[in-house]
Image (tube, grey):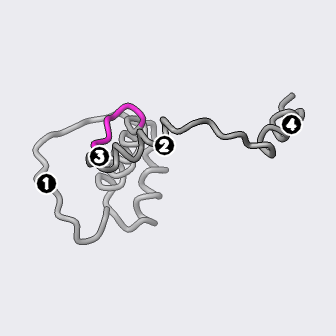
Amino acid sequence: MLPNKPQPAKSERISVRVSPTQRELLGAASRVSAVTLTDFILEAATAHAEDVLADRRSFPVSDEAYRAFVELLDRPVQSKPRLRELLSKPSAFD
């Protein structure tokens, strides 16, 4: 948890079943993190959910930032000889 960050009231409950091995792993990790097991699981699950959704969300920006972005997209293509040379060579995956 982030220190000094106000947390909204918790009114919902989620129950999960875990194996004894998973329970011990989660318990050990929460102890070394010095947080409760609930807080550890909630923080980890929330962070992962944010990562999963990150590329599926819209990102509001100011009109100025959007115009600058569109200008970059609309500018003419520039030749990059060093990039062309690099891409013409076989890669480690070929």
**Distance from label 3 to label 1 (Cα)?**
26 Å
**Label number found at residue 92:** 4
Q: Is residue 39 left or right of residue 33?
A: left
Mark positioned earlier in the residue sequence (3 or 2): 3
Amino acid under disc 4: Ala
Query: Which residue is outermost to the bottom?
Result: 4
Q: Is residue 78 left or right of residue 83?
A: left
Mark positioned earlier in the residue sequence (1 or 2): 1
Q: Secondary structure at mark 3?
A: loop
Quarter the N terminus occupies: bottom left
Amino acid under disc 3: Val
Q: Nearer the viewer, mark 1 or mark 2?
A: 2
Q: Is residue 50 magenta?
A: no
Q: Nearer the viewer, mark 3 or mark 2?
A: 2
**Distance from label 3 to label 2 (Cα)?**
15 Å
Q: Which residue is mark 3?
A: 61
Q: Is residue 91 above or below residue 37?
A: above
Q: Nearer the viewer, mark 4 or mark 1?
A: 4
In percent of the image, x 86 and y 36: which residue is there? 92
Q: Secondary structure at mark 4?
A: loop
Q: Is residue 52 above or below residue 41?
A: above
- Segment colored magenta: 55-61
Quarter the C terminus occupies: top right
**Distance from label 4 to label 2 (Cα)?**
31 Å
**Label number found at residue 8:** 1
Quick one: 79 or 38, which is closer to the camera? 79
Q: Secondary structure at mark 1?
A: loop
Mark 3 surroundings within 10 Å by alpha-carbon count, few (fewer than 14), some (14 through 19), many (20 or more): few
Quick one: 7 or 61, which is closer to the camera? 61
Contact (CB < 8 A) between labels 4 and 2? no
